[in-house]
Image (tube, helix red, strand yellow):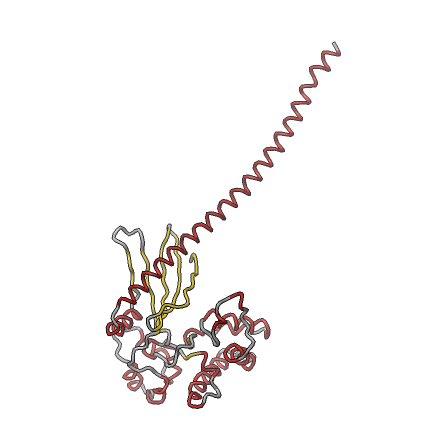
Amino acid sequence: MDKIKYINSKPKKQQGFALMITLSVLSVIIALTMVLLSYFEEVQEDAQNTKALIQADIYYTDIVSLFNSLPDKYKKDFFPILYKIPLPLTTEDNEFSLVLHCNSLSRGVNINWLGRENSGQEKVLWLMAQELLEELAQKYDIEDIGRLQEMLRQEMVGKAHFIQKEQSRLLQKKGIISYNQFKDIVSRYQFEVDDATINNIPWQKYFSFSPQVEKVDGEYSSPELISYLFAIELSAVQEWASYVDRGDLESFVNGNGGNYKKRESILAGKVFLDTTECLVDYALSKEQYRFKFEYIQGEAKHFEFYGKQ
């Protein structure tokens, strides 16, 4: 009888042991499944980004082709309209849509003018950029404007650069050729000087970041820059800038107590500057994406994909 009890009790122990093994296996399977799901989601995200980048490249090619198809005599009428009003583009079936925002690449004071101190007749450009930088330094209380100037000049005219070659194509030319490059220098300044106030400055409202800019396209400059250049109350400039049919800058300045002639040498006036910067927002699989490029004298440059917004 005892023997029978012993024999009958053995399967119960085996069942308990089997249950423990089963639970362990299930735990491993669940953990592995979670890892695989996480990996799958990551792969899906990468695949979506790749798809969005391919779509951006297609849009980029089509938009540049559209620009190139315009006769030169029409560009000076087309782009000023595009600077004022974003252009929405949608296919008939609404499967693809985008919004094209463009502005004059020359709408600010060229940051590279800070490197032209010893350039003879171009010294007036250096003075313009220098005075503006000092004005911003005082307004926003930059801690060490001298060090920032030194770092900017080193990037423009020096042999050593702050931006590493393996990180970017920016070192192919001297000077600062994009806002992202400028931001990298500002970030290095902030880290070195420990000056957080540098991030409060709306740089793009005052400066442009392209070596090709030789004149300020004042007609499309920010109200902040126009207010500074002509010593006109900012609110008055903002009101003027809000009108689509607002008249030319010279008439506005002279009619509001400013002196247009004082800045005329650095301004493009009514001459069309074929230097354009475009930002494209588009939808894909219910997500929003963005890319940017420059269109300078019939040539597309500096494509940048910003990814999901």
Q: Is residue 37 left or right of residue 11?
A: left
Q: Quadrant of residue 162?
A: bottom right
Q: Quadrant of residue 258?
A: bottom left
Above or below residue 164? Residue 224 is: below
Please state the horizontal and vertical placement of residue 15, each as a whole percent of the image.
Answer: 65, 23
Q: Is residue 17 visible?
A: yes
Q: Residue furthest right?
A: 2
- In the image, taking residue 85 as reference, residue 24 lies left or right, namely right
Q: Nearer the viewer, residue 153 or 87?
A: 153
Instruction: Specify whether 19 is left or right of 298.
Output: right
The answer to whether residue 192 is above or below residue 54 is: below
Identified at 24% across, 72% down, the residue is 74
The residue nearer to you, when weighing 185 against 115, is 115
Q: Position of residue 227 (x, y in %)?
A: 37, 81
Q: Quadrant of the N terminus?
A: top right
As displayed, is residue 57 above or below residue 145?
A: above
